[in-house]
Amino acid sequence: MLRIELDAPALANTRFVISPLYNVTDSLWLLRSTAGAVRAAGTRGRGAGGRGPGALVREAVRERRLALLESFFTGAWTYIPDFLNPQPEQHEESLERELHAVATVAPERLAQELRTMLAGDAALGIAGGRAPRALLRALDRGEAEFAELVAAELHQLWQAAVGPRWPALRARIDADIARRAQLSARQGLASVLAGLHPRVLYDEEGVRLLVDARAKLPAKALYLTPTVFSSELHISVDPLPGARQLRPMILYPAFPGPGADPGPESGPASPAGDLLGATRARLLADLDVPRSTTELAERHRLAASTVSYHLGVLHRAGLLVRTRSGHRALYQQTPRAEALRQEG
């Protein structure tokens, strides 16, 4: 588990950022098979000629021979270097600034992050892997030229697979931020943080992320970055020893846009989903009959602790009633919850 410690000033500095480049790297997770350490999202929506985004990305990587990007995202390691996602300087970054930051990354940072990727870090719960030949050949040319090659490949992938679709993808990102801002206004920032993804939990000490990595990170701020290709949760933190120079970022899947296939994890749009977030709305909809925390965890493929947290929020909001059957606590919708689900 990864914990990001947030005090009051850090919460006050928590913000959304929009990044074209983060969505380029997000698309590369579709290269990983479902047997890998991090599972790809499949195809949510269709591109030209009926091809899903995964097929478009794989085609672009193959036809343009983007060997370095393929190396990063098809290995057995569980950490992807953070220099691929440079720290944003403002609410909306430009692709040009982001690519420049990749191409000019400090050599010592690039070298350390590559070592972490390949060697892993047992103390942090990071698994390593064997370096592909393409990556080693490029490294032989020096860190500076290596970074420039990576930036050039990212630009090519943008041109081939992401850039032509960016207006529609950007609209989906804007809609996601607007919905979460509305939720924050109604229920507070804690509801937004807890609703980002089933593997994100929030308590009085900060954010807990149910991932393989193990660390406790004090943060001065937290960046929330919607992405549109992978349905997975991704975290960008500073792996270098000493003072934390980079602010942690949570890259989470944006709500599906109009006409998109939301996939099995998202569920249909609804007033309850708009208000509560997708995960709590799915749990609430499943409680038309009494169910236990364990049963819900199995049915929705979530950690029991995640389900317990969301049930607590719903119960305090008056949307669930809790009864006991022997040693089990059972939850069921209240009339108020049923009315909420039927609105609209």
Image (cartoon, grey):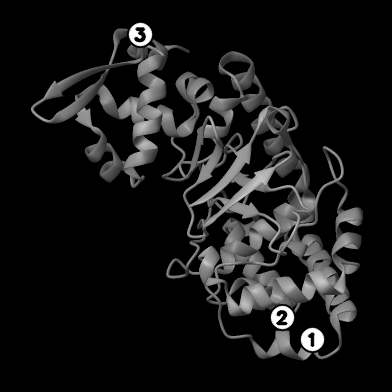
Q: Are marks 2 and 3 in contact (CB under 8 Å)?
A: no
- Asked if one can make out residue 209 in the rendered structure from this viewpoint, the answer is yes
Q: Where's residue 123, x and y in %?
A: 53, 67
Query: How dense is the environment of label 2, judged by Cα within 10 Å: few (below 14), some, or many (20 and up)?
Result: some
**Numbered mark located on residue 67 in the image:** 2
Which residue has dot 3 on it? Answer: 336
Question: Which mark sits nearer the N-terminus, 3 or 1?
Answer: 1
Q: Along the line of sight, which residue is nearer the eye, 133 or 119? A: 119
Q: CA distance from mark 3 to mark 1?
A: 60 Å
Between disc 2 and disc 1, the foreground one is 1
Question: Which mark sits nearer the N-terminus, 2 or 3?
Answer: 2
Which kind of residue does numbered mark 1 sit on?
Answer: Ala
141 over 77 or under it: above or below: below
Q: CA distance from mark 2 to mark 3?
A: 55 Å
Q: Where's residue 270, x and y in %?
A: 47, 23
Q: Secondary structure at mark 2?
A: helix
**Which residue is located at x 42 percent, y 29 percent?**
280
**Numbered mark located on residue 138 in the image:** 1
Q: Secondary structure at mark 3?
A: helix
Q: Along the line of sight, which residue is nearer the eye, 259 or 155? A: 155
**Which residue is located at x 71 percent, y 64 percent?**
241
Q: Secondary structure at mark 1?
A: helix
- Asked if one can make out residue 195 in the rendered structure from this viewpoint, the answer is no
Q: Is residue 49 left or right of residue 210?
A: right
**Residue 34, located in which quarter of the rendered image?**
bottom left
126 over 20 or under it: above or below: below
Which kind of residue does numbered mark 3 sit on?
Answer: Arg
Q: Are marks 2 and 1 in contact (CB under 8 Å)?
A: yes
